[in-house]
């Protein structure tokens, strides 16, 4: 694949992903302000009970799961889509760009 085609496809991927992220950000519903749920996760008794039943790893695991769940809701989803777009574009460029082999290096040195 030619370098120009790789750049064109990469630009298309970035534009598509970032415009999708912007649309998600613009049209995302405001977060639900559920005081019971917010109080539950910051409650010391809740964290203590988690630690009693599963240890410190259980508390860390519950906090990680809560954080990961928030990535896929509302405006946080827009940021997730934007980051996934950049990672996918970089992955595409890595796979699509041929490695410079020893023959290519020798050929470029002959033209110097």
Image (cartoon, rainbow, N blue to C red):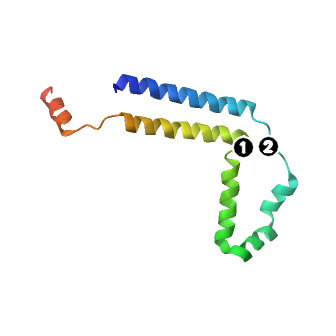
* Position in image of residue 74 (x %, y %): 73, 40
Q: Could you tell me which secondary element the residue under label 1 belongs to?
A: loop
Determine which of the numbered discs, if any, sits on residue 31 in the image. 2
Q: Residue at x 86, y 51 (%)?
A: 34
Can you tell which of label 1 and label 2 is closer to the viewer?
Answer: 1
Say left or right for 49 vs 24: right
Q: Residue 36 — which label? A: none
* Left or right of 10 on screen, residue 55: right
Q: Earlier in the sequence, mark 1 or mark 2?
A: 2
Picture coordinates of residue 31, whole percent (x, y): 79, 43
Q: Residue furthest left?
A: 110
Contact (Cβ within 8 Å) of mark 1 with mark 2: yes
On the image, numbered disc 1 is attached to which residue? Answer: 73
Give residue 19's quadrant in the image.
top right
* Left or right of 3 in this view: 35: right
Pointer 1: residues within 10 angstroms few (<14), some, or many (20+)? some
For image coordinates 54% across by 36% down, the residue present is 85
Looking at the image, is 22 positioned above or below residue 64?
Answer: above
How many residues crowd mark 2 within 10 Å: few (<14), some (14–19), many (20+)?
Answer: few
**Above or below: residue 27 compared with residue 79:** above
Q: Quadrant of the N terminus?
A: top left
Secondary structure under the numbered disc 2 in the rendered image = loop
Residue 73 to residue 42: above or below: above
The residues tagged by marks 1 and 2 sit, at their Cα atoms, a distance apart of 8 Å
Q: Quadrant of residue 47?
A: bottom right
Residue drawn at point x = 55 percent, y = 26 percent? 15
């Amino acid at each position: 694949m030619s370098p120009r085609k790789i750049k064109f496809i990469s630009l298309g991927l970035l534009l598509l992903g970032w415009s999708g992220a912007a649309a998600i950000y613009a049209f995302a519903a405001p977060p639900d302000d559920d005081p019971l749920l917010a109080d539950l996760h910051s409650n010391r008794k809740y964290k203590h009970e988690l630690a009693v039943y599963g240890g410190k790893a259980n508390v860390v695991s519950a906090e990680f799961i809560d954080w990961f769940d928030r990535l896929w809701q509302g405006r946080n989803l827009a940021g997730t889509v934007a980051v996934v777009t950049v990672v996918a574009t970089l992955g595409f460029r890595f796979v699509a760009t041929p490695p410079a082999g020893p023959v290519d290096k020798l050929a470029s040195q002959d033209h110097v």
